[in-house]
Each structure stands twice: as structure tokens, then as C-alpha cells.
Image (spheres, rainbow, N blue to C red):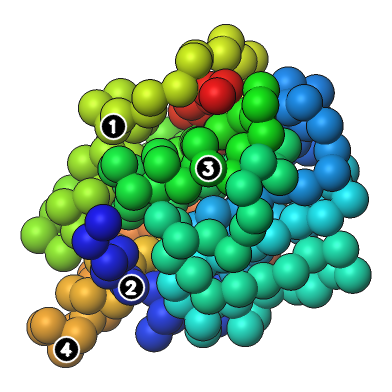
Amino acid sequence: MARRKDYYSTQAASYAAHRPGYPAPLFDYLAAAAPGRRLAWDCGCGSGQASLALAERYAAVVATDLSSSEIARAERRPNLCYAVARADAGPLADATVDLITVAQALHWFAGDGFFREARRVLRRGGVVAAWTYNLLTIMPPVDALVRALYRDLQRWWPAEQRHVENGYASLPFPFEPLPSPAFSMTSRWSFDYLLGYLGSWSAVAACGRETGRNPLARVADELAVAWGNPAAPREVRWLLTLRVGRV
């Protein structure tokens, strides 16, 4: 399996600070679908957004990522072990894992190597769950400007971003499919928090490195007008696309 490109280490602090949290009912559903609650593996964990939720439901959680910078910023728990590791070489024994989660990361390593590793470490009846989300929605004037920024950055998004855009529909997922409810993430943000989130996009950083200009600067004023009172919190929402399977 090709080594995952690391697009996030140089902006790990911003990424950790501005990633939205996943909904608790998602993890309740996955824990109920899995054959037990002894061990979960959060593969491609980033700075641990999903890992922490798993640690509330599992006796032990192993969370792995290629980026040591992101893992360094992840919150710790007594039953949560972080490790720098490839998706096709997890630090786990055969047939020990109840649940594997891949939050906003499957597009980096979906392939035979990871799928073999998943089958190796999962117990009989174990569950693999991968989910993704694309652009947020707040209110139409803000949403339109965010979409325009996203399009303007098209040349700086990695090729794998197309899988996020189509909700992982074209990625292989060779497991017995399980139906799942619809889930979404919601939060309430100030205008400054929105700018911080947009600044954590890998394409924003890539554009800045190549051009020497911050691409947010040219849209910040328009976003501010569309937002209104910058201190007024707005509801932010993302639709999750979830693929769940059993071995």
C-alpha cells in the first residue's frame, strides 16, 4: 500500500483546534452493532476526535495515524493508546478487535492492504465503519461564499478529495454491508471560529505556500458581511456519509 501523504502535520494545531465533533448517537449505534466492547481501533485518528468518543464506550482503544504531530495534540485517556502506524500494519493482535472506525480518513488508504489488516485484527462478526463529510451549511449567503472558496482552491486539493465529494461512493468496501441511520454533526460557532476552520483546510495551506498569499483574505470581508454580527453564534451543520460492514 502506498504511504499516505501527510497534508496535515504542518497545520496540526489548527486542525486539532477547529475540527467539529462527531455525534454521540453515531458511536452508540456502532457500539451496539459490534460484537463486544472490549477493544476498538481508530485508524487514521488524526488528533483523536473519534478516539475520545470510543474511549467512553470501550474498555480499550488503540488510535493510530501517520502524523506524529497530530497525535501529539490528541487528548489522552487511561484506556486510550495512541501510536504512529500505517493503516496496513496496525499494532494489534489477530482476532482481537470488536470495532474499527475510520473518521474522515478512508480516502487516504482504502485498498487491499488496509482491508487485509482489518480482517486480520477483527474478531468474528467485527464491524468496520468509515464516514466522511464535505462542506458545512450555515445560512445561504455564507454557504455560497464557502462553496466559491472551495471551488477556487480546486487545484490545491489532493486528488483523494474527490472521494470526500462523492461520499465515498466510489471507494471499495469489501465487507458485508450493514444499514445505518442518517447522522449529522452540528455546532454553534462565532465568525472567528469559522475563519479558523476554513484556515485549517489543507488546500488553504497549500495555496498559501505556493502563492505566498492567504486565500481567505480575499473572501473574509464578504463572509463577515454575510455573517452579520461577528460575535453572534450561528448553527453549523455537516451531513455524514457512513459506510458500515461486518466481517
Which of the numbered marks, if any, corresponds to residue 128? none
Left or right: 145 in relation to 159: right
Q: Along the polypeptide, which appears first: circle 3 or circle 2?
A: 2
Camera-side residue: 108 or 132? 108
Please name the residue that numbered disc 4 is placed on: 212
Question: Residue at the bottom extreme?
Answer: 212
Left or right: 226 in relation to 95: left
Residue under the point 51% across and 37% down = 119
Please name the residue that numbered disc 2 is placed on: 6
Residue under the point 59% across and 64% down = 91
* Separation (CA) of disc 3 from disc 1: 20 Å
* Separation (CA) of disc 4 from disc 2: 21 Å
Q: Residues within 10 Å of mark 4 (few under 14, many from 20)?
A: few
Circle 4: residue type? Gly
Label 2: state its secondary structure.
loop
Please name the residue that numbered disc 1 is placed on: 171
Label 3: state its secondary structure.
helix
